[in-house]
Image: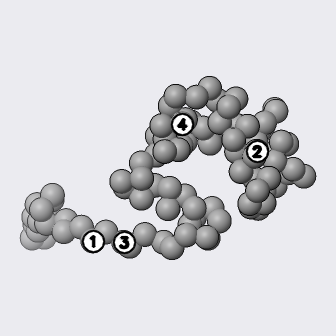
Amino acid sequence: MITQATLCLPVSTVTDLLIRVWGVYKFSIYAVNGTEEFSGVGGIGPYWAQLFSKMSNDTGDYQAFCNYNYGYCDPLPVVQIDESKYFKPKVRTSQ
């Protein structure tokens, strides 16, 4: 839902939504208030709007973002990759 909103709405609307969400949940920010954090010069609202437009719920992007930045969400399990399916063994040369 966040991805669709960031793709369909202007960046200023997404920034306003971030300010409103901060007003309700008061998650940790670096500025004095949500308006200073997300809008204006150096505000991260436009950056987050672009970031959210590229994220996918199917791949766990939002959960990873939440866990990495705020620690509210559980970390995603580590995906084990069998590298032998993608890389040939190294050839050893005698010296």
Three-letter amino acid code at disc 4? Answer: Ala
Residue at horizontal 85%, vertical 42%?
36
Locate residue 14, reporting x and y percent.
Answer: 65, 36
How far is the residue under mark 4 from the one under mark 1?
33 Å
Q: Secondary structure at mark 4?
A: helix
Q: Earlier in the sequence, mark 2 or mark 4?
A: 4
Q: Residues within 10 Å of mark 1 (few under 14, many from 20)?
A: few
Tell me the number on the disc at residue 80: 1
Q: Earlier in the sequence, mark 4 or mark 1?
A: 4
User: Does the residue at mark 3 contact the one at mark 1 (Cβ under 8 Å)?
Assistant: yes
Three-letter amino acid code at disc 1? Answer: Gln
Identify residue for label 3: 78
Locate residue 57, reporting x and y percent.
Answer: 42, 53
How far is the residue under mark 1 from the one under mark 2?
38 Å
**Location of residue 63 with respect to 42 vertically, above or below:** below
Q: Give the quarter of the image for residue 47.
A: top right
Identify residue for label 4: 5
**Location of residue 20 with respect to 69 vertically, above or below:** above
Locate residue 90, reporting x and y percent.
Answer: 14, 64
Identify residue for label 2: 19
